[in-house]
Amino acid sequence: MSELINRVDGWLNPILVKELRQSVKGRGTVIIMNLVMVILLGAMLISQGNVDVLSDRAGMMIFSIISGLLSLVCYLIIPLVLYARTSGERTLEDQDLMYITNMNPRQIILGKYATGLSLLLFYICLALPFMAFSYMFKGIDLLTILISVGSLLATSFTVVQLAVMLGAIPMKKGIGSRIGGMIFLLFFFGRGLAYPIMYATGGISPTGVSWGGMMTGKTILGLGLFVLMFNIPIFLLNIAILCPATTDRARTLRLYLSGLWLLVLTITYFVPDLAASWFIYFLLLSLFSLLTSLAGRDEIGIRLRRLIPQNDFRRNIAFLLFGGSAGGIIWSLLLAAVTVGAAMVCSFTQRNLGSLLGGDISGKLLTSGLMISGYCLLTYFISRKIRMLKSYNVVPIAAFVFMMVLSLVVTIAREVVRDLPDIWLYISPLGSFADYQAEMPLFAACFMGFSLLCVIPGLFRQYRAFKPLAVKQEESA
């Protein structure tokens, strides 16, 4: 028996053991546990007194109240705890400690995920007796409770992944503590995280409100796509963040997303209801990839140059998959282009892009996508002309803040100044959603073309420099 316990102990992730030991020894877990139990008990007693227990929806109403309070813990408190612990270990001052450990980035991330999953299961199990109390009334069955709890666990685990990802970004201690407020946004994001996929596949919401048949093929497909399109990419992105900058961090993630694009497109051929979700997801994904590529390195180190293939065709493919800024920008633009092109010409739609998404929504999305891409490329061009920047990590943040401020200023100006010239809507990244006009896509395409012409020389220089290490260079290195 002792030998079996020792084997199991050896299989456990050291990060999981450390985190759980800290939770058990600290007072915070005990305080939060008792506070959650008191709140759930009080909510159950209050709902029992205010809800008509003889109505047909009494059980659903009580269950919604309890699951809503539980979601506050799963979407907010647990991600905040994991974010605080991860960010405390990933400050710029302690960054070297991450690279001298015997554990690889995958083991570290899996340990953090296992800790978050353990805490989620602990508090969900803590609330299950209160949820079972709602089963005594009418309006809800046991299967609905179990599926709702599973949906809550899936979506809250994704929020935990995002919290670990934000905490894994190396920052100074002062800056890292200030952006902790960003996690509060994850609560609202997590509440609606599963709805696009669940709506498209006839699933259920995290709070137990169901539509369509439960546990049907579409529901299972929706949960599978949720894991493929959210959980796995975030996991690969977390590993890429922990890897040193001198390694090929982006290749695995871009390879996976390229395969995922083809897989979901094939599934959409048999399930046309997923067409709009597929288009919006990969369009937004290409914009996010383009934004993050602005922080990529322009020069490739000796370690990466040893991995560049000698074959020209394989070298071109490797250029798109390696973690340089030029390859990331071109890969992101190609992903957006093939997504729009496939939505227009694939036979599964049997109609044009406008009718695919309904009304002017396709034009609004395309206009905003072109404007955001143009601003990202223009920011990339300006940042490379400024020689004072020691690092390009601040470039994506500057581009994002500028676009959001410009959109907010234009929105406020439209409310204050009634006769605001239309040009302000045209230059706003999100102006098409405020007041869409037929000429906006043409203006956005021209702006995108101008920005692309500005960055083409720099991208071409990086492409020409993307060559394998010569024998003489390798000997000198």
Image (cartoon, helix red, strand yellow):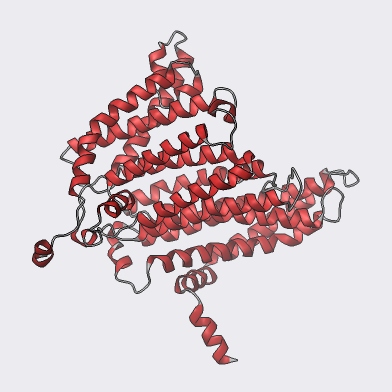
Q: Quadrant of the C terminus?
A: bottom left
Q: Estimate the x, y position of residue 157 in percent, counting from the top left.
A: 56, 56
Check the image and name the residue furthest to the right: 54
Against 352, residue 10 (above or below) is below
**Residue at 49 percent of width and 70 percent of height:** 16
What is the x, y in percent for residue 261? Answer: 49, 47
Q: In the shown orientation, is residue 336 left or right of residue 473?
A: right
> In the rendered view, does 315 fall on the left or right side of 183?
left
Check the image and report above or below for 264 versus 133.
above
The residue lying toward the viewer, choosing from 222 and 89, is: 222
Picture quarter with the N terminus: bottom right
| Residue 248 can be seen in this image | yes
Q: Residue 371 in the image: state x and y as whole percent.
A: 38, 28
Q: Work out whether 283 lies above or below 67.
A: above
Q: Quadrant of residue 122?
A: bottom right
Residue 163 seen: no
User: Can you tell which quarter of the image residue 471 is in?
Assistant: bottom left
Choose between 237 and 10: the one closer to the eye. 237
Judge from the rendering whether residue 95 lies leftward or rightward of residue 150; answer left or right. Answer: left
* Location of residue 309 (image quadrant): bottom left
* 421 versus 265 height, above or below: above
Can you give x and y, in whole percent of width and height, for residue 54 in the image?
91, 46
Residue under the point 41% across and 54% down: 255
Residue drawn at 47 percent across, 9 percent down: 418
